[in-house]
Amino acid sequence: MCVNHMQMCSKGWIVSQASITYSLNLDSSLLFTHQGKSPCTNEERFHKELKRMEALEVVLKEERPSQWVSSMVTVTKRGSNRVCICLNPKDLKNMIQKQHYPMKTIDSVISILPNSQVFSTLDANC
């Protein structure tokens, strides 16, 4: 099963397709993560949710052998019969090369302010 990289919304799943480019650390060896037993007791609900996700193209069925496998966890939401399917991308995240975007210093910002007329503040503690 391959995850299709799309921008998702909590209500409608797919808002629009996004083009995402990652750089991988090729020195890292590809990893096969052991697939543990799923705590989901109702396989019918699991397969129904998986088919729904395939229909929305959130996941794609993979027929070929793969060198990379992430562990999957199924969870039944409390108070409902809805099944959520989750992947643990911990090892994949370790292979992605981080991009560093340095924050501008106050000195570099002040140098472009002399001709400015409108100022605002931003609370970036999200």
Image (cartoon, grey):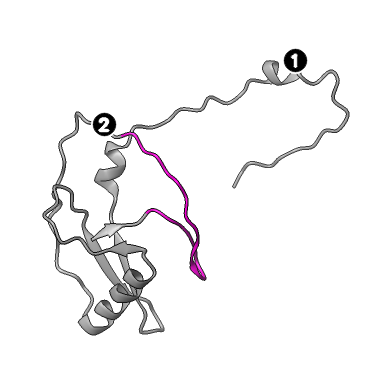
Q: Residue 6: horizontal and vertical position, in percent?
A: 43, 56
Q: Are marks 2 and 1 in contact (CB under 8 Å)?
A: no
> Which residue is depicted at the point 41% across and 83% down?
79
The residue beneath circle 2 is 25
The residue beneath circle 1 is 111
- Tell me the magenta residue range: 5-23
Q: Is 82 colored magenta in this rendering?
A: no
Question: Circle 2 sits in a helix, a strand or a loop, which is it?
Answer: loop
Near-viewer residue (38 or 28):
28
User: Left or right: where does residue 58 sit relative to residue 74?
Assistant: right
User: Left or right: where does residue 77 sit relative to residue 104?
Assistant: left
Amino acid identity at mark 2: Asn
Q: Is residue 76 above or below residue 21?
A: below
Q: Is residue 105 above or below residue 21?
A: above
Q: Is 15 colored magenta in this rendering?
A: yes
Q: Is residue 73 above or below residue 102?
A: below
